[in-house]
Image (spheres, rainbow, N blue to C red):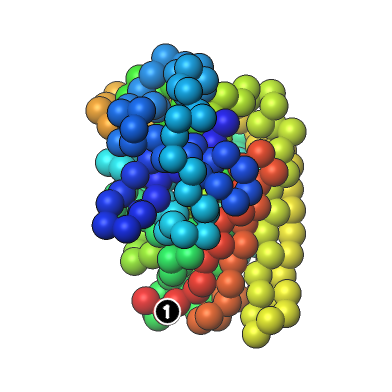
Amino acid sequence: MKICRFQHRDSIRVGLVADHSTILDLTPAGITRLSSILEEENPAARLGKIEQEKLPRIPLAQVQLLAPIEQQEVWAAGVTYLRSKTARMEESDFSANAYDKVYSADRPEIFFKSLAEKVSGPGQPVGIRKDAKWNVPEPELALVLNSKGGIAGYTAGNDMSSRDIEGENLLYLPQAKVYKHSCALGPWITLGATEAEVREWIIRISIQRDGSAVFSGETSVGRIKRSFTDLAHYLFRSQEFPHGAVLLTGTGVVPDDTFTLRTNDITEIEISGIGTLKNTVAVV
Ligand code: DO4
Ligand code: MG
């Protein structure tokens, strides 16, 4: 079951994704916020009780999908895949040891990524910094967590990153990771999947430039070293998220070191159990 946030005419609404071309508007069922579903004990069961045939059907082509987030902070886990650890160790000099250690430590790397209102949705720009020379997308599974830290659903995310800034000095991580349009989420949230099912999903990315693919890669969610519950648990330690939180789970696909994004490149991140998040790169 998939739920989305969308703009239709002048209002922002919540919908159920019926199929690849149709949304069911949940407004007549009294659902106008994602949070009212995400905070339910069993979000998929709650939606299952709604009489879907009474809901207005809207063609997907007639709406603007929005990032599936309302007031949650977005955080990100890092170095959760072996590929990420190796790539970071290669790009850095004296920081390399830190990546090596965090990969096998009990405590994961978790950093703040974005406020909800700054997140790009489907079709919106993703940014590369004008003071960075080496920029990449990071295609990541995102956990959608309720205010108690429980996993309510999953969406696709892009943890845009400046590798030269990050590689120069680990203390520059917030500048490499948090800037205008550095985070994208979407196209919607998948509910009701277990961790075991999600670990079977495949994450794919392709990058197009002037109509041709300049990079493509894929990984399996199952290659994440840590469990989702462990990551969520660390995020919620000594913290409160009254609106819930979104947690990116790290990247397992890193283009080789000669690759950097350019303005107008198109990034397409597909997660098999979710859908495709498509954005265009802009210099910010
Ligand atoms: O410490 C660097 C960031 C790691 C990251 O974002 C990732 O592994 O996805
Ligand atoms: Mg990342």
**Could you tell me residue 10's position as x and y percent?**
27, 57
Determine whether 165 is above or below 110 in the image. Answer: below
Quadrant placement of the C terminus: bottom left
Give 3 or 51, whichever is nearer the viewer.
51
Residue occupying image coordinates x 62% and y 22%? 194
Give 257 or 101, whichever is nearer the viewer.
257
**Could you tell me residue 41's position as x and y percent?**
42, 14
Quadrant placement of the N terminus: top right
Q: Residue furthest top?
A: 41
Residue occupying image coordinates x 74% and y 59%? 217
**Could you tell me residue 138's position as x and y percent?**
57, 57
**Could you tell me residue 142's position as x and y percent?**
51, 41
Give 223 or 164, whichever is nearer the viewer.
223
Determine whether 3 is above or below 217 in the image. Answer: above
* Number of marks drawn: 1
Q: Residues within 10 Å of mark 1 (few under 14, many from 20)?
A: some
Q: Residue furthest front?
A: 54
Rendering quarter of residue 2: top right
Which residue is the site of mark 1? Answer: 283
Task: Check disc 1 and give the amino acid type.
Answer: Val
Q: Is residue 154 visible?
A: no
Residue occupying image coordinates x 48% and y 23%? 51
Label 1 residue SS: strand
Residue occupying image coordinates x 53% and y 80%? 264
